Amino acid sequence: MNYIDEGEGHPVIMVHGNPTWSFYYRNVVQTLKSGFRCIVPDHIGCGLSENPKRGYAYTLDQRIEDLSELIDSLDLDRFDLIVHDWGGAIGIGMAIQRIAKLRRLAILNTAAFVDSRIPKRITICRAPLVGKVLVQGFNGFAGPAVKMAIAKEPMSPAVKRGFLYPYRSWSSRKAVYQFVKDIPMHITDRSFGRLMEVENGLLKLRKVPVAIFWGGKDFCFNDHFMDRWKRFIPQATLIRYPDGGHYILEDEQEKVCQAIEQFVSYDEDGIPDTELV
């Protein structure tokens, strides 16, 4: 497992989703690394991590185990956590098992609970044969995401290349397809039970400072998911960016990075020095 480990100070773990990689958090790392230790892993098969040829489960349970092994190996006393997309279920699944170590949680357009809503375009990508050919053969998930996940100014060519760099061939896109395939939509799906376990653990987060930074124009995790988060974690600070898309760190880079910096810089007792904006 490849991971970024930059800066010194209180650890902030950032967990990406699909089809991104640690590159997604590059601006957050630049903002925080002067005062915090930024730890940003690439999931197995994603980014610069190993791309297994066989024998790897590609399940939510395996992803949580991978992240848990990394965090335990770093021997962290406490940490903050930032999650996005699939990183929500993975990161929070790891953290609720170590709830005494979790100091603060930042949530960016994600879910960590069972829900029946899924865009039709993602449903197509889940199809056993068509989906595999579309996602692995024609890059029909990571490729369109660099446009669909943005709601404001288009990505520059350089940034687009950065997002797509690890996913340039059939074999390198295996994890992208497996992530889509593993979305638990029905009780018979292999990761449904594990996601239910994560959902049942969300009540533990009611004693943790939580901030939600939400893009209001997300084609996938729309405001329905934001409202569900508010019910699970009613004490959370919510900042909604009405013009931000799924890649909220691209559409609202400066605002969200500044807000995250304020959030993780709060006094230890949880009383803010300044209001989040």
Image: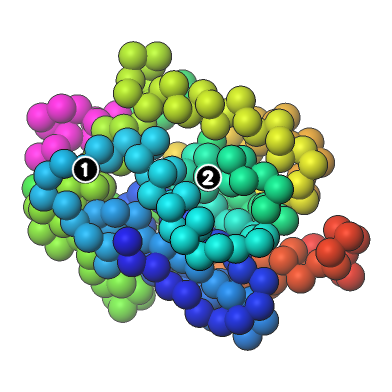
Residue 106 against residue 226 in the figure, above or below: below
Which secondary structure is most common in the magenta stretch?
helix
Secondary structure at badge 1 equals: loop
Task: Tell me, for residue 56, which label it has, or none.
Answer: 1
Return the residue nearer the eye: 108 or 179: 179
- Residue in view at x 71 percent, y 31 percent: 203
Amino acid type, label 2: Met
Res. 241 in view:
no
The reply, left or right, for residue 160 in relation to residue 263 is left
Q: Is residue 259 above or below residue 232?
A: below
**Element assignment for label 2:** helix
Task: Evaluate if marks 1 and 2 touch, with contact meaning CB atoms under 8 Å apart.
Answer: no
Q: For residue 10, which quarter of the picture?
A: bottom right
Q: Which mark is residue 88?
A: none
Left or right of residue 196: residue 267: right
77 horizontally vs 276: left or right = left
Q: Nearer the viewer, residue 130 or 243?
A: 130
Q: Which mark is residue 94?
A: 2
Res 258 seen here: yes
Q: Position of residue 264 (x, y in %)?
A: 72, 66
Mark 1 and mark 2: span between their CA atoms?
A: 19 Å
Highlighted range, magenta: 122-136
- The image position of residue 238, as x and y in percent, is 74, 48
Pinpoint residue 118: horizontal percent, then vertical percent. 41, 29
Residue at coordinates 80% horizontally, 63% vertically from top-left? 276
